[in-house]
Structures are given as structure tokens and as C-alpha cells.
């Protein structure tokens, strides 16, 4: 899955697609929880370890793997926001 669309704009279906691409072993656990709690991209970016535990990811190692990938998504989102700000500054 590419990051052509900002993560904060992802639908629940796009979050499921990302999770399938990056953490397929956890899909059995996470799919129902993502749908049940309507975890969109905006919510995904805010998840912390205790949220993952509540969603069924109990192993600390698995939580850390997911959190590391979420950190990369957050960084990409920040870069996109900065690019938007710069584009607005230079287009005036």
C-alpha cells in the first residue's frame, strides 16, 4: 500500500489494508477490533501501547513492532503537513 493519500484521511478499510500489508499475522486479532471501533487513519495515528492491548495485541514485542510502524506513519503525516504549509507560503 502506498502513502499517496494522507494517513489521517484513511478509511477503516484502508487501515485494514495497511494492517494486512504490515502485520498480517495480527489480522485475525485486529480485523474485528478495527471494524468494531471504527479505527480510521486519524485514530490509527493516535494509538498507544495500551490501546493495542485493549484491541487484543497483548505481547509487548508485537505491540512494539506495530508502534514502530505507527511512528513511521506519524512522521510521514508530519512531513505531509509541513509540505502543505510550505506550499501555502510559497504560493502567495
Image (cartoon, rainbow, N blue to C red):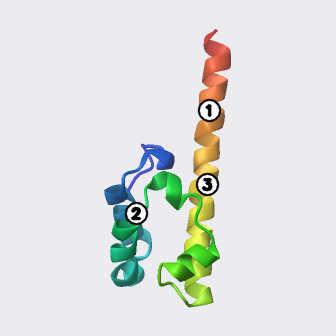
Q: Nearer the viewer, residue 46 or 22?
A: 46
Tell me the residue that label 3 is attached to: 74
Q: Residue 32: x, y in percent? A: 33, 75
Residue at image point 61% right, 37% down: 81
The N terminus - image quarter: bottom left
Please tell me how crowded label 3 is: few (under 14), some (14-19), or many (20+) other residues with Cα within 10 Å. some
| Residue positioned 57% across, 64% down in the render | 70
Q: Is residue 48 above or below residue 6?
A: below
Please tell me which residue lies in front, 92 or 58.
58
Q: In terms of sequence position, does the residue under pointer 2 or pointer 1 come before the other? A: 2
Q: Is residue 67 left or right of residue 8?
A: right
Specify the quadrant that holds the C terminus: top right
Q: Secondary structure at mark 2?
A: helix
Give the residue at mark 1: 83
The single residue placed furthest to the front in the displayed view is 37
Is 43 left, or right, of 15 in this rendering? right
Q: Position of residue 36 (x, y in %)?
A: 35, 69
Q: In the rendered structure, are the residues bearing label 2 and label 1 in contact, judged by CB atoms less than 8 Å apart?
A: no
Q: Residue 53's image quarter? A: bottom right
Give the structural element (helix, strand or loop) at label 1.
helix
The reply to whether the C-beta atoms of the residues labelled 1 and 3 are less than 8 Å apart is no
Give the residue at x 48% y 78%. Answer: 55
Q: Secondary structure at mark 3?
A: helix
Instruction: Estimate how packed mark 2 is, as few (under 14), some (14 to 19) or many (20 or more) residues with alpha carbons within 10 Å.
Output: some
Label 2 vs label 1: CA separation?
23 Å
Q: Mark 2 vs mark 3: which is more N-terminal?
A: 2
User: To which residue does mark 2 refer?
Assistant: 18
Name which of mark 1 and mark 3 comes first in the sequence: 3
**What is the C-alpha distance between the residues marked 2 and 3?**
14 Å
Amino acid at each position: 500500500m502506498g502513502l499517496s493519500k494522507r494517513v489521517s484521511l484513511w478509511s477503516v478499510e484502508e487501515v485494514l489494508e495497511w494492517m494486512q500489508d504490515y502485520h498480517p499475522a495480527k489480522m485475525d486479532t485486529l480485523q474485528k477490533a478495527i471494524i468494531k471501533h471504527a479505527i480510521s487513519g486519524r485514530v490509527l495515528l493516535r494509538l498507544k501501547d495500551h490501546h493495542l492491548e485493549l484491541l487484543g495485541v497483548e505481547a509487548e514485542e508485537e505491540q512494539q513492532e506495530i508502534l514502530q510502524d505507527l511512528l513511521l506513519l506519524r512522521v510521514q503525516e508530519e512531513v505531509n503537513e509541513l509540505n502543505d504549509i510550505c506550499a501555502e507560503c510559497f504560493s502567495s
